[in-house]
Image: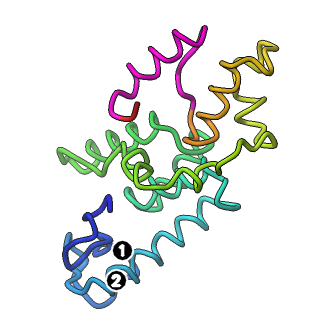
Amino acid sequence: MQESGGKGNDPMQASESGYNTKYPRVPNGITGPEYSIEVGTHTFSDCLKKAKVKNSSDTERIYLALQGYNYGSDYIEWAIRNFGGYSKYNAQQFSDNKKQELNVSGYGDPSYVDHVMRYVGITFRGGANPNFNNLEAWVTKNPYAQAGLYGQCTWFAWGRFYELYGYDPGFSGDGSSCVKELVAAYPDKF
């Protein structure tokens, strides 16, 4: 959906992939939708392997693989080497570096992960019920847990957001403040 809305002759926008051996490796070079899907799924599979995705709950590595699909798999190695993985910040930095290196006005979509994830069902991102075994969401990355506020509503809201979306919601403080901060940060989602 993100690449083409499911339309056109190259719905996966996979023409420039190394798996494309039948058509020119230029934007929209593929003119067969089924072949585009075949090439795109092989390319994404490689990104998942390179990002070392463990399972469908491994959102941080899935996000790394998604951004790698958009930028090319070199991004995955670069992000791991320089930052330990994906972040919105390093996605923007990679794009900026490539624009300068290639002397072009644009390079990929730094917000690709968010743009793709809007099409992904919530059950894929975290299931219908909270998974309290997800240590990052509930303990190690949760600032409310680090402050000893286990069981508080803001602890739960922060953890559930992280579990579902895979990144820090960016709020702090009491529940009312959190809602205002969240809506201000993501007006297109909430």
Q: Are marks 1 and 2 in contact (CB under 8 Å)?
A: yes
Observer-nearest of 136 and 101: 136
| Type of the residue with mark 2 | Asn
Q: Looking at the image, what colour scheme do you see?
A: rainbow
Displayed quadrant of residue 21: bottom left
Q: Position of residue 178 (x, y in %)?
A: 53, 15
- Find numbered disc 1 in the image and state the secondary structure of the residue it sits on: loop
Name the residue carrying label 1. Answer: 17
| Type of the residue with mark 1 | Ser
Q: Is residue 138 above or below residue 151?
A: below
Q: Position of residue 59 (x, y in %)?
A: 60, 50
| Quarter of the picture holding the C terminus | top left
Name the residue carrying label 2. Answer: 20
Q: Position of residue 113 (x, y in %)?
A: 43, 48
Residue drawn 57% across the image and 55% down it:
62
Query: Does the segment drawn in magenta span residue 171?
Result: yes
Q: Which residues fall within the magenta stretch?
A: 168-188
* Callout 1 crowding tier (Cα within 10 Å): few <14, some 14–19, many ≥20: some
Left or right: where 67 falls relative to 99: right
Left or right: where 114 falls relative to 98: right
Q: Which residue is most to the bottom?
A: 22
| Quarter of the picture holding the N terminus | bottom left
Query: Does the segment drawn in magenta span residue 182?
Result: yes
- Find numbered disc 2 in the image and state the secondary structure of the residue it sits on: loop
For residue 60, the mark is: none
| Mark 1 to mark 2 CA distance (whole Å) | 6 Å
